[in-house]
Image (tube, coloured by chain):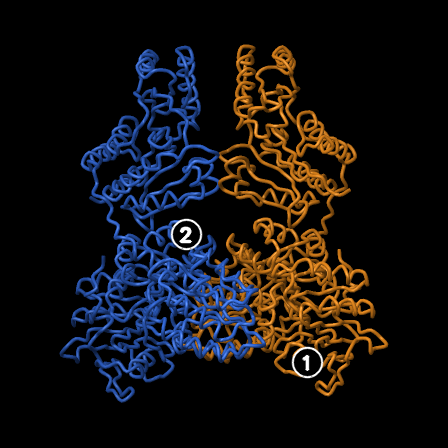
Chain colours: A orange, B blue
Amino acid sequence: MACAQEMRSLFEPRSVAVIGASLDPAKIGHRIVANLVAGGYAGEILPINPKGGTLLGRTMLTSLNELDVAPDLAVISIPAAHVRGAVEQCGRAGVKHAILITSGFAEVGNVQEERNIVACARDHGLRILGPNVFGIYSAAAAMDATFGPGGILPGRVAIVTQSGALGIAMIGRTAAESLGLSALISVGNKADIDEADLLSYLALDAATRVVLLYIEGVRNGERLIDTLRAVVPQRHVIVIKSGRSERGARAAASHTGSLAGADDVFDDIMRQCGVLRATSIEEAFAWSHFLAYAPLPSGEGTVIVTNGGGIGVLATDACEQHGIDLFDDQQALQETLGSAVPEFGSAHNPVDITGGADAAAYEIALGGVIDHPRMRSAIALYCETGLFDVDAFSDLLRRLWSRVRTRKPMVVSLFGGATVEGVIRDLRREGLPVFSDVYDAVSSLGALYTSWRAQQRKTRIAPASDTNMADVQHIVRGALDEGRQALIGEELHELATLLGMSIPASSVAHSLDEALQEAQTIGYPVVLKIVSKDILHRSDAGGVALNLENEQELIDGYQAVLRQSRSNVPGALIAGVEVAEMVRPGVETIVGARQDASFGPVVMFGLGGIYVEVMKDVTFRAAPVSEQDVQEMIADVRAYPLLLGVRGEDRKDIEAIVPLIVRLGQVVSACREITDIEVNPLVVYDQGGGVKALDVRVLLQRTER
Amino acid sequence: MACAQEMRSLFEPRSVAVIGASLDPAKIGHRIVANLVAGGYAGEILPINPKGGTLLGRTMLTSLNELDVAPDLAVISIPAAHVRGAVEQCGRAGVKHAILITSGFAEVGNVQEERNIVACARDHGLRILGPNVFGIYSAAAAMDATFGPGGILPGRVAIVTQSGALGIAMIGRTAAESLGLSALISVGNKADIDEADLLSYLALDAATRVVLLYIEGVRNGERLIDTLRAVVPQRHVIVIKSGRSERGARAAASHTGSLAGADDVFDDIMRQCGVLRATSIEEAFAWSHFLAYAPLPSGEGTVIVTNGGGIGVLATDACEQHGIDLFDDQQALQETLGSAVPEFGSAHNPVDITGGADAAAYEIALGGVIDHPRMRSAIALYCETGLFDVDAFSDLLRRLWSRVRTRKPMVVSLFGGATVEGVIRDLRREGLPVFSDVYDAVSSLGALYTSWRAQQRKTRIAPASDTNMADVQHIVRGALDEGRQALIGEELHELATLLGMSIPASSVAHSLDEALQEAQTIGYPVVLKIVSKDILHRSDAGGVALNLENEQELIDGYQAVLRQSRSNVPGALIAGVEVAEMVRPGVETIVGARQDASFGPVVMFGLGGIYVEVMKDVTFRAAPVSEQDVQEMIADVRAYPLLLGVRGEDRKDIEAIVPLIVRLGQVVSACREITDIEVNPLVVYDQGGGVKALDVRVLLQRTER
């Protein structure tokens, strides 16, 4: 995890130099100084411009060199060609952080200059935010060092955005929505400082309760994951990741120059880290608003109170979609809320107090929920009726709110006309979690529950490895030293044994006689597989013969395997033919591990064959993984019921898959030369029957040691 | 389809009686009269109250009997116990429609009284809306006969809602959002008039361009489907159906007393009918706003113009999600929009004119899209920047809008602070399709494209049946007459032959000798299956023996099948043992047809076994179906690539599945005694190889003939 202390002078500098400060109010260098002044920054503001002059009552310095003490932070907004010089000057002077507002670097292909600047900064221990950013806002220092429109409200939500334009626009939008910010930072090209660095600070920042990340591409995913794992137990973390679709990912790549990670992997890993993924900015803002002030629930069990059956049903649908458990003790509901429900209403949850309900009925019902020890949270719904005034309802809400705000989570949705809309705006400004859309209200409560569950679960430590990594390394290096990028034959067997994989009895025969002898030892039926470093996909090459039941079939199979392999892969160097035990059928799965381009070591699980290839029914986790991670991952695939047993079949031996995936995760985490391990199929038998790895593929790469 | 003419006096009555009119402004009977007056209804308003008096300047009648000419419409708001009497009086007087505002009938279990009222109305040719409704608004007659808050704006959107509370609240909400209505009707308990009746009128109503349905449960689905099929080519139809989740469906059932149909079937059939399904009220309103005034596109090919890369990528993701094809001719984009894009922007679609863009750049880019013959629609995105004023942008939008509004669909999203929000409100009030959320903008355009595609496709007539229905009926009645609820043995073979299903050669043996003889005729390998009306699931009962390759295996199999069937289903009457051709393996599918409780005859398709049972990978269509319906239905399953051929396999014979499903649909549509036909598995071979039905199950019920 990145170091929080290192980021302190970025968020809480004692002094800020603005290099490129300008007298022209239309210029960025002017606006930043103006925002610093207007925002009430209490530290020293040092505008710098070679021409000198006076800006907003401050005498401009002509150069950093005029200062005796270097500023903590320098914001640089000068033409790209001059940036490197300015950074070098900052570095020499002892500036701790520099924000490069200037664009025209990696995002337009000018990669080398960006690298040079970072290298120069590193030489002086100077950390760089940007280039191609709009700056930083930090409530801790009352510092608006952006060129945005100003007027940022201080609060509990920290926004980290990869899109500058969106970030600038968010300044206005958050203010219009009364969404208070603890920080707002644009990371731009992430030449040096990235999300992980910023999160390390925000995790410890007293004001921040929610971190909202807008991400287009992940560069150093491993670091991000480590940081997120440390942050989630302390803070609610929401991510919006664009580039979900294939075309969107292409657009994102051309836009920021960073590779958008495969969206499925991203989605799985965020879930693993307990991060909430929002599908739109509106949704992320709705959640942020609520999570910034809501108390954590004390348990599952939500009660819906509504005066309209229709919105009650819509809310119930939304609860299922967002993983909210509805309180279900009918007797408790009747006892506590029954008197608020007329004969033709329903004390079933959703509790329909009907269109005739007045403030008193709401007070009985919601008051009952608030005071009941096992009703853990409330969803209050109000449909405008001709008969019951929204003003009476809003007064009631304010009273209830003062009772519930620190005790239980409650969300409210009001549906109606202009007056209702006005009431919603007023109540939101006062901090009440009131929404006009039922779905926004429910999804916000769902986000709280999801985040709470992630925070509740014990910190998961991947178990210490019981695999002899030195032996693994030895096998891998042996193959690499022979110039190969894959393990073959005996190497695969050795690795499988090291990983504790039960594999079919087998050995390699170099002649038909040897094959006959081996088959005798193993016992019929057997299978034959060609052994050749030139043939990776043995079935496709005709290099496999299955279910050979006797000597004659073995002889025919042996000849066929050799003939077909030679004819399909002409010139292939054939090391022999593997004779192996014919394996009992079971449920075929695929387990694997690999070095992901964005996220580093990941493990994978899916049901075999068609499920993976056609249905894309696979799940991923960042490695190393705990057993609990793997259990969740297995339960995540849609075809999971197959493992639980369908059509009266027995439950399969899921417990035998778990340690294998844990070990695969350990190996790809420890040994970066292994780019890919795929066990396909891994046959899973009935509970207690274990698993068998039928085929193992291992791909390698040389890394700097 | 229901008759539009019959509904005219409900929507455009020349006179309206309000039975239960009241002097007390808090009473519903008062508010309805007040709304009629305030809404400017031009027909005669006839308040009726036995006590007489003067209401809003109108003398109240003490009874309908005082009138010489019966009113077209009577709105009845009196206690439930008196409703039947009032309905009878209306009927006798010759009133054409009665709206029963009163609640306390089927929704609280008082089913019989509701039936009695409808029966009484039918005797007099009186049609009933309700009971348990809030009334009707109809712009065609400037008639607000509801007890809502008033102030409804006339417009192009007709809302039909099953939830009264939601409908009342929608009155205020639509006015607040400047969403104009052509009609608003609550259907309540649907004792007589249902959505289909109302749609038949709205399909021909000149003002209505969008129909928005809020549905909790479908009662007479067949009629609704027929009507929707007729309406969709004329109007955009949007549906919100609550009770999606299992728990929500239970809540909906307790709330309205009508069974919520299985959501998957509903979803598939709405798609078949070209109906747009919205997930929330907000989404439905956003779509309605746009669809009410947008011109239809002239083709596929949308261009996104943005000043922020981030929202451009978000919009691209949303386009993929909502089925919007992005315009892709790079040369045309460069030629037409290139000059609006600075060096570091992108003329790739999404076209990023960058944060430095001013009104002129937008004008070049969007103007280019408007004038280009192959760019069919536009998505304009604006992120508030410090540098380019939203007022300049809104002026530009108004200019562009006047050029594009009748020519091409365009949606706009503005993202920013309070000023931007104000501009959005103003522009929406002027009718411009401007949204604050990118997703709302894109999903609205997506809804237009989906509806347009449905309108474009030729009316699909299910082909005339080539099945001899008399023979089918004969088989079915024979079985029913024997008191059976399933077809067996020869009956199944005959039906299969009538349906043109290629089934394995087989015949029933009544002794081992016969079995041996049959196997000789058919040729080994063969399979054996027990024949018994007491054994429906033959595999489960051990009544099946597969792949018998010779006489000895046949003998063993014959004995095993009999022994196991007898031991597993003691007392089963065994009619013989079927000897059948052993079928080559292929892709296993399931096809079926049944009488759905909500929707009547439907057909079903899925990939066999696990895909259906575990993955729930099945699709449905309302029958009868056209070949095109079936082709779409088959392509809808997630495992469809299996039929197209994966891993280098050949394409399967999809063309052979299609006519079979068409015929199944014809049979269950024509013969309601057949409740279920399931062909499982239907084995599908490579293209040209046809299909084979391995097992056919047919269930029956007696219906009134």
**B383 with respect to B565 (left or right):** right
- The image's mark for residue B217 is none
In the depicted view, which residue is nearer to us: B136 or B328? B328
Residue B201, percent from left and from top: 24, 65
Residue extending farthest left: B68
Front label number (1 vs 2)? 1
Residue A318, percent from left and from top: 50, 59
Labels in figure, total: 2
Which residue bears the numbered disc 1? A22
**B131 with respect to A394 (left or right):** left
Q: Residue flagged by tag 1: what amino acid is it?
A: Ser
What is the chain identity of the residue bearing mark 1? A
Calculate the distance from the C-alpha at mark 1 to the C-alpha at mark 2: 62 Å
Q: Residue at x 35, y 68 (%)?
A: B294
Q: Residue at x 68, y 80 (%)?
A: A22
Mark 1 residue element? loop
Which residue bears the numbered disc 2? B263
Q: Is residue B515 above or below residue B269?
A: above
Q: Is residue B235 visible?
A: yes
Residue A10, percent from left and from top: 75, 69
Q: Dividing the picture into quarters, in which one does residue A286 lie? A: bottom right
Q: Residue at x 57, y 56 (%)?
A: A253
Residue B594, percent from left and from top: 32, 42
Q: Is residue B243 visible?
A: no
In the depicted view, which residue is nearer to us: B41 or B409? B409
Q: Residue at x 57, y 63 (%)?
A: A445
In the depicted view, which residue is nearer to us: B408 or A416? B408
Mark 2 residue element? helix
